[in-house]
Image (cartoon, helix red, strand yellow):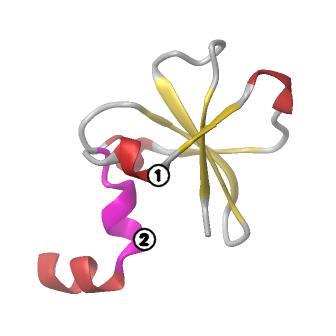
């Protein structure tokens, strides 16, 4: 299951870790997941884990739900 994080060093972005994609950063805005960027290394010292549902309007949750992807197609 992917894990979502916030960081005071990245106040306008979400950070995500997933076994499938590794680390990613994406804007905390509507459809921000479409603008995600891979990250090679992330310093965990300022990361704060948050529930996935907080990124509800970014497109992240829809990308994780195969049924939602089929409905959108």
Q: Is residue 16 above or below residue 43?
A: below
Seen in the picture, residue 70 relative to 30 is either above or below; the reply is below
Asked which secondary structure carries label 2, the reply is helix
Q: Is residue 11 above or below residue 3?
A: above
Which quadrant would residue 20 be assigned to in this image? Answer: bottom right
Point out the image quarter for the C terminus: bottom left
Q: Please tell me whether the stretch drawn in magenta is mainly helix, strand or loop.
A: helix
- Write down the residue under mark 2: 64
Residue 6 in the image: state x and y as whole percent: 58, 29
Q: Which mark is residue 43?
A: none
Image position, residue 41 (x, y; %): 85, 39
Circle on res. 52: 1
Q: Which residues are magenta?
A: 58-65
Q: Residue at x 59, y 18 (%)?
A: 10
Q: Residue at x 47, y 52 (%)?
A: 52
54 inside magenta stretch: no
The residue located at (26%, 86%) in the rendering is 67
Is mark 2 in CB contact (under 8 Å) with mark 1?
Answer: yes
Residue 72 percent location from the top left of the image: 14, 75
């Amino acid at each position: 299951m992917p894990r979502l994080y916030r960081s005071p060093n990245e106040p306008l972005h979400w950070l995500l870790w997933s076994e499938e994609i590794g680390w990613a950063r994406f804007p905390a805005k509507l459809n921000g997941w479409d603008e995600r960027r891979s990250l090679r290394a992330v310093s965990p010292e300022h990361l704060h884990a948050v529930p996935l549902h907080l990124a509800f309007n970014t497109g992240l949750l829809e990308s994780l739900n195969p049924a939602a992807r089929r409905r959108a197609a």
